[in-house]
């Protein structure tokens, strides 16, 4: 995965649909900073643009810290739109990972069924 030119972070995400397809994404940084998009949102946007709307698992990895990466708040809400109970594999640079879930990282969440 490419390095973000400003943060120097490399983040990758692999999102699996309930029918087994995998869509990947990387963080895409912007000179104006604010328009930067995270790997998780790129992966889900790519999947939705391809017509997939049901997901079960996302793996997220980074090569920066020794601790597993965690998705930012914006991504948690973005992912929530299509899967309240999304399983998460938070991967360390050495390939080991911890399991988490969106319902754990974004409890009592607001979603489409409210509208
Ligand atoms: O879960 C995360 C956390 C951060 N980033 C990106 C956004 C930015 O390019 C860089 C630093 O925040 O890492 C992601 O892609 N996913
Ligand atoms: Zn994010």
Image (tube, rainbow, N blue to C red):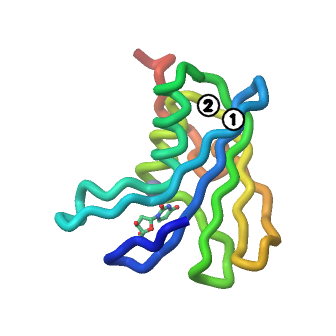
Left or right side of 2 for 4: left
For the point 26% across and 62% down, which residue is it? 30
For the point 59% across and 23% down, which residue is it? 52
- Crowding at dot 2, Cα within 10 Å, few <14 / some 14-19 / many 20+, comes out as some
Left or right side of 64 for 98: right
Which quadrant, please, contains the N terminus? bottom right
For the point 56% across and 38% down, which residue is it? 108
Ligand 1 rendered quadrant: bottom left
Asked if residue 87 is positioned above or below residue 1 in the image, the reply reads above
For the point 23% across and 59% down, which residue is it? 34
- Image coordinates of residue 87 in percent, x first then y, are 73, 44
Q: Which residue is mark 1?
A: 85
Contact, mark 1 vs mark 2 (Cβ under 8 Å): yes
Q: How many marks?
A: 2
Left or right side of 32 for 55: right
Which quadrant, please, contains the C terminus? top left
Depth check: give the residue in front, 24 or 71: 24
**Cα–Cα gap, marks 1 and 2:** 6 Å
* Residue 19 marker: none
Q: Which residue is mark 2?
A: 83
Element type where label 1 sits in the image: loop
Element type where label 2 sits in the image: loop
- Image coordinates of residue 38 in percent, x first then y, are 44, 56
Q: Residue farthest to the front?
A: 2
Q: Residue farthest to the bottom?
A: 66
- Image coordinates of residue 114 in percent, x first then y, are 45, 19
Depth check: give the residue in front, 1 or 94: 1
Rendered image quadrant of residue 98: bottom right
Depth check: give the residue in front, 74 or 46: 46
């Amino acid at each position: 995965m490419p390095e973000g030119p400003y943060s120097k972070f490399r983040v990758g995400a692999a999102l699996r649909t309930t029918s087994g397809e995998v869509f990947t994404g990387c963080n895409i940084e912007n000179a104006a900073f604010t328009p930067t998009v995270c790997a998780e949102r790129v992966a889900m946007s790519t999947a939705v643009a391809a017509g997939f709307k049901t997901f079960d698992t996302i793996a997220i990895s980074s090569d920066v810290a020794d601790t597993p990466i965690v998705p930012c708040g914006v991504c948690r809400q973005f992912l929530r739109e299509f899967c309240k109970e999304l399983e998460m594999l938070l991967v360390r640079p050495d390939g080991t990972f911890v399991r988490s879930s969106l319902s754990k990282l974004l409890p009592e969440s607001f979603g489409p069924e409210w509208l």
